[in-house]
Amino acid sequence: MKIKENRFFRFFVCVLIFSTGIFAGSGAGIILGNPTGISFKISKTQKKAFAFASGWSRNSFYLHGDALFYRNDFINWEEGNVLFYWGGGLRVKFADETKIGFRIPLGLDYKFDEEPLNVFFEIVPVLVLVPETDFSLDAAIGIRYLFIVSEFQ
């Protein structure tokens, strides 16, 4: 099982690294909480993005991918850009039992004016579907370096 997970992880990371250069607004960084690991974001438009993370969570290897939708009129801020976001995606945790669930991320994303960085905080209700139905709540903070600064952040 570990060999398959390791190959899948390598493939996942390679795809994300090579795909980040394709879209304006791509970024990579760290995420702390549940999970703790690396985070990637690919902005498609000012109001849509895809976010991915891989890492460790309570003695398990963790992957998730989300489609995110942004709202920029939620908070007025004098410097930088604060966006509220929500979305949906999938989470997979590899442990003694593989667990697969549906995520509903809710968060805030702050883009600095002068630096190619964004900081985010999210709370994520998760409906676990495999191996049995369960509910959990994830929360994380993170920071990403933006490779291609554009109007999409």
Image (cartoon, grey):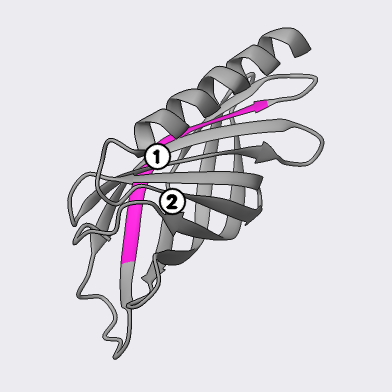
**At x 59% / y 16%, what residue is drawn?**
8
Quick one: quadrant of the C terminus? bottom left
Q: How far apart are marks 2 and 1 (CA)?
A: 8 Å
- Res 31 label: none
The amino acid pointed to by label 1 is Asp
SS label for mark 1: strand
In the picture, residue 109 is in which quadrant?
A: bottom left
**At x 53% / y 42%, what residue is drawn?**
126
SS label for mark 2: loop
Residue 40: where, in percent of width, then height?
Answer: 46, 44
Q: In this view, does 20 lie to the left or right of 133?
A: left
Can residue 14 be seen from the camera position used here?
A: yes
Residue 110: where, in percent of width, then height?
Answer: 39, 71
Q: In this view, does 50 lie to the left or right of 16?
A: left
**At x 44% / y 31%, what residue is drawn?**
16
- Res 66 label: 1
Q: Marks 1 and 2: in contact by CB < 8 Å?
A: yes
Tag nearer the camera, 2 or 1:
1
How would you rate the neighbour count of disc 1 (Cα within 10 Å): few for under 14, some for 14-19, many for 20 or more?
A: many
Q: In this view, does 119 lie above or below 114?
A: above
Can residue 35 be seen from the camera position used here?
A: no
Residue 86: where, in percent of width, then height?
Answer: 34, 54
